[in-house]
Image (spheres, rainbow, N blue to C red):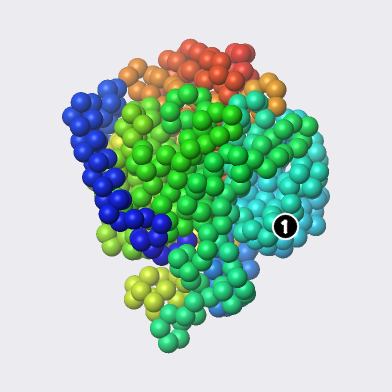
Amino acid sequence: MRQVDKGELIKPGRQRQIVRALTATFAAFALLAGCHPSGSPAGKIHEPQSPIRLVDIAQSSGAVYRWPEEPRPFGIKEAFGLGCAFIDYDNDGWPDIFLVARPHPILFHNLGNGKFEDVTDRMGLSKLNGFWTGCAVGDYDGDGYLDLAVSGYGAFALLKNAGGETFTDSTIAAGFDPKNHGLWGSGMGFMDLAGNGHLDLVVLNYVILKSPADDYCHYGVDQVTGCPPSHYQAQYPELWRNVGKGRFEDATASSGIRASAGKGLVLAFADLFNDGKMGFVIGNDGMTNNFMKNLGGMRFKEVGPQIGLSTTADGGGIATMSADWGDYDRDGQPDLFETNFSQAPFQLYHNLGIGLFEHVETQMGVAVPPYLPLGFGAKWADVDNDGWPDILALCGHVYTDPKKIDGISEFRQPAMLLHNDGGTKFTNLTPDLGGDLTRPILGRGIAAGDFDNDGRIDFVVVDLEGAMMLLHNETPPGNHWITLDLHSPGSNRFAYGAEITAHAGKEQWTGLVSPASGYMSSSDPRIHFGLGSTTSLDSVEIRWPDGKKQPIANLAADHIWRIDEGKPPAIAPNR
Ligand SMILES: [Ca+2]
Ligand SMILES: [Ca+2]
Ligand SMILES: [Ca+2]
Ligand SMILES: [Ca+2]
């Protein structure tokens, strides 16, 4: 969330060697593989068009909440911000909205008619007081209802969803510390990392504030605001093993994840080595990033530098306020997008499919100098259903009056809708689109999901010091789409970690059930593909979390399909 300190934790000489070695390796493999692995449809060029319409309907929908103005000076704690989530807590098929807020979170029930109702009190959330920051969603006890974890500054809560009727504070009963050992919790995610059917929990922690005054730094003669991350000592992630019966054990020490650089903000899971074991990228603040490879047996190895995922192209650290996987070129391999500090490039890592990544942010147009936006939460989503996943990146500064510090940056900034032009480049459509996207906000958390089940992905947006935005996707519905709602037997009822590959002719789409993403946020766990002109998928193969594979033939577009493991798909109700 702060300026990148390129020297931090990176030995520049060593880093340049790694970059040179990887560049040489990439060049060799690019020659062998012809740059793009075979089957890539990246040759099709789609001219950027702007039929996209994202309209903020929060006010008329009844999902009305305004985060209050933070005290000034705007220190690092005040600027840190908050996450949000789509969570269908009552299993009625309509995604509900959870907002991290202080002193307590907010929950809106989706009534299914475009309206929302505030159920914070009814669901027992108004008594949950703390300096909350982020959230994660997952059914940790396997009762078929999605539960919540909420992180905070010296605070943590595990909220058991009791049959969709109330949330019960199960923090202590599950083995957690409600004060998070005094640590500053940030991004989190549920995933079955041990491969035993139970969802484990990764909790990132940020930095140590030694005293309240440590919240602020002085810039020039009159600017007092938050400090760069290099000012602070790092805190480190925790890994909690789900041992069943609603209990967790701290597996941090034995897991190897303390090899993280620390100052973690966000994480996103991926099965990069095609072995069915979920690893995860950790986005840190102004540091190198990490990829924790899952070795099995709840042990992890940091392999970020070896696979080319830890630094900028020139070996620098990244202020990684968001990290999200999406297969932008549809070659079957997940690629990684990361936001960054202002005057530092957003990052796009292309997955070469051989356990290596290459930087493509410059040639793909996601990092256009002078890199003015300060990026926060970002999500891949095929906003126009043309088949190609786009990026919505929120922006907003962390200094009270940044122009007085850097001479150019604004405090509130518009979001960037980076349209994927056929896998060949990205175009920021926000200036063309106008409307609510151009409203300058203090962007922080973001969640993507189809709240009205019309096949077009919508977004919940956190505007720190502003009103929640519910960006309703009103793009003309000419393109086709498909949504897959996966369910497994056993404890991992929402099939976290299931991998999907779909084909229609020579085209392919891939997805992973893993809602933890954005900035300390959680998205709709259902898999959504824009299909362009495709009206039916020839085949869908699901690799379920237990490793079983299920092929499905001839799935019609423009439906939400519920698929229970081992059973034929059925059209979901509620649309
Ligand atoms: Ca619901
Ligand atoms: Ca790819
Ligand atoms: Ca698209
Ligand atoms: Ca929608």
Q: Is residue 142 above or below residue 440?
A: above
Is 205 rendered above or below residue 458? below
**Whether residue 226 can be seen here:** yes
User: What residue do we see at 62% from left, 59% from top?
Assistant: 184
Task: Say which quarter of the image contains residue 79.
Answer: bottom right
The residue depicted at 80 percent of the width and 50 percent of the height is 124
Residue visible at 63% across and 19% down in the picture: 564
How many numbered discs sit on the rendered protein? 1
Q: Residue at x 33, y 29 (%)?
A: 354
In the image, farthest residue toward the left: 31
Up-down relation of residue 130 to residue 546 (above or below): below
Report the side of 160 relative to 327 (left or right): right
In the image, residue 30 lies at what x, y percent? 22, 31
User: Residue 351 in the image: x percent, y percent?
Assistant: 34, 35
> Please, is residue 548 above or below residue 466 in the view?
above
Callout 1 secondary element: loop
Of 322 and 395, nearer the camera is: 322
Amino acid tagged 1: Lys
Q: Which residue is mark 1?
A: 179
Residue 270, given in percent of the width and then of the height, sits at 48, 34
Q: Is residue 430 visible?
A: no
> Is disc 1 surrounded by few (<14), some (14 to 19) or many (20+) residues within 10 Å?
some
Q: Quadrant of the C terminus?
A: top right
Compare residues 445 and 141 and report the one nearer the observer.
Answer: 141
The single residue placed furthest to the bottom in the displayed view is 221
Q: Could you say where residue 36 lies in the image, as x and y percent from the top left? A: 26, 29
User: Assess mark 1: CB under 8 A from ligand 1?
Assistant: no
